[in-house]
Image (cartoon, rainbow, N blue to C red):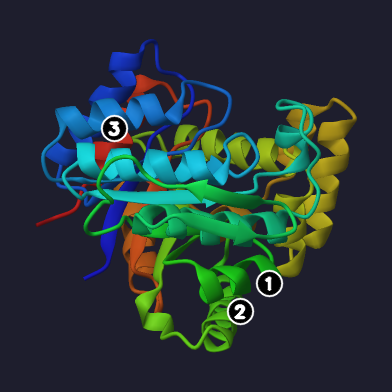
Amino acid sequence: MTERGVHLPVAAQDSFDDLVRLGERAEELGYDRVALPETWGRDGVAVLSALAERTEKIGLASSILNTYSRSPALLGQTAATLQEASDGRFRLGIGPSGPVVVENWHGVDYGNPLRRTRETVEVVKQVLSGDTVTYDGSDFSLSGFRLRCDAPDPAPPVDVTGMGPKAVELAGRFADGWHALMLTDSGLDDRLADLERGAALGDRDPDDIHVTLVTTCCALDDPEEARNLTRQHIGFYVGGMGTFYRDALERQGYGETANAVYEAWQDGDHAEAVGLVGDDLLDDVAAAGTPEEARDRLAALESLEGVDEVAIGFPRAADQSQIDATMDALAPER
């Protein structure tokens, strides 16, 4: 059975406790995993630490911690600690983010994101083994580092995110899982072919790689409210968060729309940009509308071959009541 997870929102939470309570609520509702994307809000590791203490059985994941704001050795330590704190329920999700975040917000040269992601995965796995780390790469050279505590047993899986063909191939070759987002059904098929190619290069079975499809969801009694919130979310990411989302949509046949959204957003006309997100695009990459409509779309996504988990995310402008309503409406039926 395909798992169903929750990606906690990065905005609209008045307090740390409000954010953690959403994770507790996900466990009460029967979701399989709760993940936290770390952007520019509350620190992801602190929130996940609190969730490890306040929950008992739900899986926990970072999705994602970026590979530029933390060193690979620190990411390994973090994964080992969260695996211990959660009694073995943690998955480490990492990725390079993009130059808008890395260079503008963290002040670090973006460099070669694929190489950095690969080297980070390799170093993290050495750290988690408990052995002394010896690594000589292009971005990182380490010697002498070793966990001072016992290595986690089992070691937490290391997942990566990726939107382009080479990034997904890298996930198939080196990581334990891949986090997919902003994908149509046919776009997912294309990227799964990249994942399988990477698995073959790494002499691995692609069925051993956990595929998580992250989907923006909004299920409300007022379907237009739900769709408008989701439309705004897509417009923001395509228009204001660098080139990756725009490039991903262009590969999936939405190049004209994505470029128009981007240009309008960059010109400062955010309302026009959001209005350019048509119903076809909205329905292809999200699950938004009435509770019944959103449930039907989510069920269709969970039936896609190659998907191990569908994780519901929320529009960035959704308030607490809208998030609660969506979580309740899309809770797994056990």
Nearest the viewer among 55 and 235 is 55
Q: Nearer the viewer, mark 1 or mark 3?
A: 1
Residue 62 occupies which quadrant of the picture? top left
Q: CA distance from mark 1 to mark 2?
A: 6 Å
Which one is earlier in the sequence, the residue at label 3 or at label 2?
2
- Characterize the local packing of mark 1: few (<14), some (14-19) or many (20 or more) Cα atoms within 10 angstroms: some
Please, what is the three-letter code of the amino acid marked with disc 3? Ala
Residue 134 occupies which quadrant of the picture? bottom right
Q: Indicate the position of residue 184 as horizontal and vertical percent values.
A: 57, 66
Residue at x 68%, y 35% (from the top left corner): 236
Q: Which mark is residue 165?
A: 1
Residue at x 34%, y 68% (from the top left corner): 308
Which one is earlier in the sequence, the residue at label 1 or at label 3?
1
Please, what is the three-letter code of the amino acid marked with disc 1? Pro
Q: CA distance from mark 3 to mark 2?
A: 36 Å
Q: CA distance from mark 1 to mark 3?
A: 35 Å
Q: Indicate the position of residue 122 as horizontal and vertical percent values.
A: 53, 62
Relative to 113, is 79 on the left or the right? left
Residue 75 appears in the picture as rendered: yes
Q: Nearer the viewer, mark 3 or mark 2?
A: 2
Q: Indicate the position of residue 327 as horizontal and vertical percent values.
A: 28, 38
Question: In the displayed structure, would residue 10 be above or below residue 76?
Answer: above
Label 3 sits on residue: 325
Residue at x 18%, y 45% (from the top left corner): 58
Dot 1 and dot 2 residues touching (CB under 8 Å): yes
Nearest the viewer among 289 and 37 is 37
Residue extending furthest front? 144
Label 2 sits on residue: 194
Which one is earlier in the sequence, the residue at label 1 or at label 2?
1
Quarter of the image with the N terminus is: bottom left
